[in-house]
Amino acid sequence: MSYGQRELDIRVTEDRLAERLDDGRMHVLRADVPLRDMMPLAESDLKYTIVLFAQCAACGTTWLYGLCIRGRPAYKPVEAGTEERWPWSSVPERERWAR
């Protein structure tokens, strides 16, 4: 089973990714919003897909972490440069969804 097909516990995945970002094992390449803002934005139903691309400092692998209001979350390795080709869309004003 691939990373994209595994059932994810969103809170656990978010916590583990946050640890890696905080201690420098990974760094954000590009994201719709900061990691801890992804769930509140998804729960607002104002943006269909919310993504964050991060890179592993040790091996250089690019990882996609994504939430979708109508689908399963994803945490999987992707081709380098995917964040540059991603079909980015605007994020609603923070006042409309932030807690």
Image: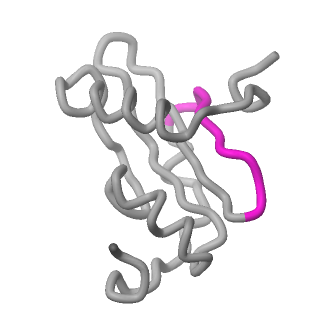
Residue displayed at 74% across by 26% down:
6
Q: Position of residue 38 (x, y in %)?
A: 44, 58
Observer-nearest residue: 25 or 37? 37
The vertical placement of 17 against 49, above or below, is above
**Residue 73 sits inside the magenta stretch:** yes
Q: Position of residue 26 (x, y in %)?
A: 30, 27
Q: Position of residue 41 (x, y in %)?
A: 48, 69
Question: In the visual, does 61 lie left or right of 49?
Answer: left
**Residue 54 sits inside the magenta stretch:** no
Which picture quadrant has residue 58?
A: top left
Q: Position of residue 75 (x, y in %)?
A: 59, 34
Residue farthest toward the top in the current orientation of the protein: 58
Dividing the image into 4 quarters, which one contains the C terminus? bottom left
Residue displayed at 38% across by 26% down:
16
Dividing the image into 4 quarters, which one contains the N terminus? top right
**What coloring was used for the rendering?**
one colour
Magenta residue span: 70-80
The vertical placement of 66 against 19, above or below, is below
Observer-nearest residue: 71 or 4? 71
Residue displayed at 65% across by 40% down:
74
Observer-nearest residue: 56 or 35? 35
The vertical placement of 58 against 93, above or below, is above
Residue farthest toward the left in the current orientation of the protein: 23
